[in-house]
Amino acid sequence: MAEVDLRPMSLGEVLDRTFSLYKRNFWLFAGIVSLPYLLLLIVNVAIAQMGIGAGASAPKDGGLPSVGLLAGAAAGGIVVLIFYFLLTGAAHAATIFAVSDLYLGRSPSLRNSYGRVGTKVFRILLLFFIFFVVVVIGFVAIGVVGALLRSPLVLVFFMFLGFILLIILLCRSAVVIPSAMLEDAGAVRAISRSFELTKGHGFQIFLIFLLVAVLSYVGILIFQAPFMFLQADALKAHQTLSLGMLILQNLSAFVSEVLVGPIGTIAFSLMYYNLRVRKEAFDVQHLMASLGSQPAPGAPSAI
C-alpha cells in the first residue's frame, strides 16, 4: 500500500497535489474521461454527417422544413443531451473514485473506478436536474420582478444579484457529487453535506473554480478556436464545413476535454477530503479504521 498523507491542506497544497496526481496518473484519468467523450465524439460525427446529407437533399426553393422533421430533430437533441449528461456524470463519478483510491493509498484502475459507479450515475443526473430547476426558477423570478417594476436599472441590479447568488450556490455545492459518491448519500443529503463542509471555505473554492475556468478557456483557445473561426467564416459565406473539417473540429474538442476535464474533478475531490479532515477529523477516523482492520503485532495468522 502506498504511503497515506492525510492532513489539513492549504489551497496551494490542494492545487499542488491536484497537478501532482494528474501528472503521475495521467493515463488513468485520461482513460476515464476519454471513454464517454469518445462515444460522444462518434455521436457528434454521425450527427454532422446526417446534417450534411440532409442539407444536400433539402429542397432548393427555400421552403421551411416539415413539422415532422423539426419534431424529430428536437427529440433527437433531447436524447443526445440526456446521453451527454449520463456519460459525463459517469466519468465524473469514476474520476472521484480514482482520486479517492489514490488519496487513501490504494491502487485504482479504470475498470474498478467505472465499476463502482453503477446506478449511482442516475443520482448525478438528479443532482444536475435539481440545480437546473433552481437556477431557472431563480432567473425567472428575477425577470418577473424586473417586469413588474418596469425599471431596466432595477432589472440589471437583480440580474447581477442573481449572478452573485449563482456563484455562491456553485461554491457551496462544490463537493456535492463527491459526497453523493463516496458517502453513498442521496441527492438531498449530498446537497446538505456539501453545504456543511464548504461553510467558511467559499472563497478558496471560488478560486479553484476560477482556475478551472481559465484552464478550460485556454484549452478551447488552443484546440477549438481555429475551427470556430473557420465555421464563422463558412456561415458568413452561407456555406457549411466539409465532413473532414467537422471531424477535425470534434476531435479537437475531444482532446481539449480529455486534457482539461479531470483537473477540476481531482481538485474538488481532494478539497472534499481536506474539508473532512479539517472539520470531522477524517484522518483520525481513517487511521482508527485501518488499525482496527489489521491484526495486532505478534498476533497469530488467520491462514
Image: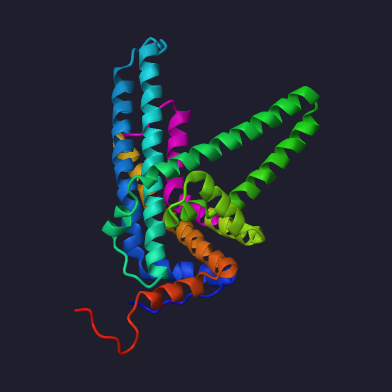
The answer to whether 291 is drawn above or below residue 138 in the figure is below
Looking at the image, is 120 positioned above or below residue 30?
Answer: above
- Residue 93 position, x and y percent, is 40, 52
How many numbered badges does the structure rendering display? 0
Residue 29 picture quarter: bottom left
> Which residue is at 38% across, 59% downward?
97
- Residue 232 visible in rendering: yes
Q: Position of residue 130 (x, y in %)?
A: 53, 38
Q: Position of residue 231 (x, y in %)?
A: 43, 36
Work out whether residue 150 can be spotted.
Answer: no
* Quarter occupied by residue 138: top right
The answer to which of 156 and 197 lies nearer the viewer is 197
At horizontal 54% and vertical 65% (from top left) the residue drawn is 276
- The image quadrant where one finds the N terminus is bottom left
The span shown in magenta is 214-242
* Left or right of residue 209: residue 234: left
Examine the image and state in which quarter residue 239 appears.
top left
Q: Position of residue 211 (x, y in %)?
A: 56, 59
Residue 134 is one of the magenta-drawn residues = no
> Which residue: 29% across, 27% down?
50
